[in-house]
Image: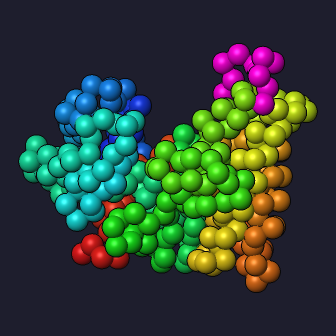
């Protein structure tokens, strides 16, 4: 009988906590089962979020039929991968910063636990088992409510001295000149290229003619139909991201760029603008680096977090 390693996986975000059992069998792609997602209730504070996470892990453990190898966690915020502590979280998860997440899980379940940042987990999953499978170097960029990323080198994520590497959303770009960022700096990519940035700019441009309750999908569709305000909002986002990705590829020279997140599913106007910004900044030797869509969807951070239990995502974690 072939050995199968089973890992409980959690994906903890500001709006929902997903949980699942990820099964690894040699020679096969990981299988995700027992999937469930529940509201985080982040507005109720860090202790509440922790309790929801513990309950979610308990649900999967109770339902699993075989021995559990450990618990892998993907979480919003800045994570110390050595301890599993949440060292910082923004206002989307009040009170989450300072949570000793890894230790709380170890104390409750007496199992090996590894915690990583949610974008790192997503990138690790895609690089190991998704669009980047078989590639030596992958640059992963997740574009949704915010923008984050990671550079994966031979199956290990570049972490940095302060566990901060990969903040693609906080790279400067020409389209954002003079625009304040929620981090306190000026001119960063995230405020103009993320989903809320697209919506805000569209509403500003359209004024009284703005579609009611516009979201990323409806704005993208309107842009492809020829709506001028939607076109400008989509173009600014795509162009800015293309400019930044071109610059990052000049620096890191990956085999591929992997895009994921809701904004990456935008239509023709956004993708044409991305190609335009890319062409303006990328150097000729790396201009043919493929830009690919992620293939694992919402399973990417669960698979990445689970894989991290079996083999560390980070070079300096032994």
* Image position of 198 (left or right of 104): right
In front of the other: 269 or 71: 269
In front of the other: 55 or 143: 143
Residue 156 x %, y %: 42, 73
At 44% from the left and 66% from the top, the residue drawn is 165
On screen, residue 191 above or below 15: below
Residue situated furthest right in the rendering: 226
- Count of numbered circles on the image: 0
At 82% from the left and 32% from the top, the residue drawn is 229
Residue 315 in the magenta stretch? The answer is no
Q: Quadrant of residue 245?
A: bottom right
Q: Quadrant of residue 64?
A: top left
Check the picture and name the quadrant holding the N terminus. Answer: bottom left
On screen, residue 309 above or below 282: above
Q: Colour scheme of this structure image?
A: rainbow
Q: Quadrant of residue 211?
A: top right
Check the picture and name the quadrant holding the C terminus. Answer: bottom left
* Image position of 264 (left or right of 231): left
Residue 47 x %, y %: 19, 33
At 27% from the left and 72% from the top, the residue drawn is 317
* Image position of 193 (left or right of 283): left
Residue 80 x %, y %: 27, 60
Residue situated furthest front in the rendering: 178
Q: Is residue 285 visible?
A: yes
Residue situated furthest bottom in the rendering: 285
The span picked out in magenta is 205-217
Residue 69 x %, y %: 22, 56
At 42% from the left and 56% from the top, the residue drawn is 121
* Image position of 157 (left or right of 106): right
């Amino acid at each position: 009988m072939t050995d199968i390693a089973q890992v409980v996986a959690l994906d903890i975000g500001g709006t929902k906590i997903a949980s699942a059992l990820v099964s690894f069998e040699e020679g096969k792609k990981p299988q995700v089962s027992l999937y469930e997602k529940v509201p985080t209730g982040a507005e109720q504070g860090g202790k509440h979020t922790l309790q929801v996470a513990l309950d979610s892990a308990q649900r999967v453990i109770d339902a699993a039929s075989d021995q559990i190898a450990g618990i892998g966690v993907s979480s919003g915020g800045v994570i110390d991968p050595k301890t599993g502590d949440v060292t910082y979280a923004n206002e989307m998860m009040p009170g989450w910063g300072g949570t000793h997440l890894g230790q709380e899980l170890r104390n409750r379940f007496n199992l090996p636990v590894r915690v990583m940042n949610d974008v790192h987990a997503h990138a690790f999953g895609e690089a190991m088992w998704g669009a980047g499978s078989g590639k030596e170097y992958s640059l992963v960029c997740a574009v949704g409510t915010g923008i984050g990323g990671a550079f994966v080198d031979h199956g290990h994520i570049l972490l940095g001295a302060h566990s901060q590497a990969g903040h693609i959303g906080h790279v400067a770009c020409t389209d954002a000149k003079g625009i304040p960022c929620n981090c306190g700096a000026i001119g960063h990519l995230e405020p103009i290229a993320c989903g809320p940035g697209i919506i805000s700019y569209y509403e500003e441009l359209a004024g009284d003619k703005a579609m009611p309750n516009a979201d990323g999908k409806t704005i993208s569709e309107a842009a492809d139909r020829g709506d001028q305000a939607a076109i400008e909002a989509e173009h600014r986002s795509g162009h800015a991201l293309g400019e930044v990705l071109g610059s990052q590829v000049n620096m890191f020279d990956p085999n591929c760029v992997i895009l994921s997140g809701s904004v990456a599913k935008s239509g023709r106007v956004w993708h044409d603008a991305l190609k335009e910004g890319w062409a303006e900044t990328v150097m000729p030797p790396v201009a043919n680096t493929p830009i690919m869509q992620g293939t694992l969807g919402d399973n990417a951070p669960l698979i990445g977090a689970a894989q991290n239990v079996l083999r560390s995502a980070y070079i300096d974690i032994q």
